[in-house]
C-alpha cells in the first residue's frame, strides 16, 4: 500500500543475463521485495547500452539480447527499506 511521506528509491543496473542459482537475478529480487512488503518495483530491459569496457550492446531483430542492461527500481518508505536490507543481507550471508 502506498503512503505519503519520505521514501527511498533504489535503482540497480545489471546485465540481463545475470543469474543466481540458475534464475534471472531480477526475478529473485522482485520475489524478495514483494514478500517483504516493499511498496513497488519495476524491471526494465534496455534496447542498447554499454558498460565498464565500453562495448556497445544492442538488441537485434534476429536475437533476443546481447548482454543488454536491465534495471530494477523500487521506492518504499525508509523504515521498510532498512528492514528489507537487513533481512536481505542475512539471507545473502546464509546462501
Image (cartoon, rainbow, N blue to C red):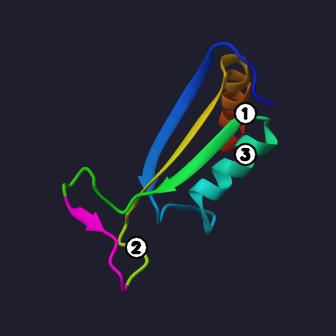
Q: Answer with the quarter of the image where residue 84 lies.
A: top right
Q: Is residue 6 above or below residue 20?
A: above
Q: Is residue 5 magenta?
A: no
Q: Answer with the quarter of the image where residue 79 lies.
A: top right
Circle 3 packing at 10 Å, graded few (<14), some (14-19), many (20+), is: some
Q: How far is the residue under mark 1 from the one under mark 3?
A: 12 Å
Residue at the spot of label 1? 39
Residue 92 on image: x %, y %: 65, 43
- On the rendered structure, is 4 left or right of 53? right
Residue at the spot of label 3? 32
Q: Which secondary structure lies at badge 1?
A: loop
Residue 50 on image: x %, y %: 26, 55
Residue 35 on image: x %, y %: 80, 43
Nearer the camera: disc 2 or disc 3: 2
- On the rendered structure, is 50 left or right of 12? left
**Residue span colored magenta:** 55-62
Q: Is residue 73 above or below residue 19?
A: above
Which quadrant of the rendered structure holds the N terminus?
Answer: top right
Query: Which label number is shown at residue 65?
Result: 2
Kindly indicate whether the residue at mark 3 contacts the one at mark 2 (C-beta within 8 angstroms): no
Q: Which residue is depicted at the point 74% across and 33% down? A: 87
Q: Answer with the quarter of the image where residue 74 lies.
A: top right
Q: Is residue 58 magenta?
A: yes
Amino acid at each position: 500500500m502506498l503512503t505519503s511521506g519520505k521514501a527511498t528509491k533504489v535503482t540497480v543496473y545489471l546485465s540481463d543475463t545475470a543469474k543466481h542459482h540458475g534464475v534471472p537475478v531480477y526475478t529473485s529480487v522482485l520475489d524478495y521485495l514483494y514478500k517483504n512488503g516493499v511498496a513497488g518495483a519495476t524491471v526494465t530491459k534496455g534496447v542498447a547500452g554499454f558498460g565498464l569496457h565500453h562495448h556497445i550492446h544492442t538488441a537485434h531483430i534476429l536475437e533476443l539480447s546481447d548482454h543488454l542492461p536491465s534495471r530494477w527500481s523500487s521506492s518504499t518508505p525508509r523504515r521498510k527499506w532498512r528492514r528489507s536490507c537487513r533481512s536481505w543481507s542475512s539471507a545473502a550471508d546464509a546462501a
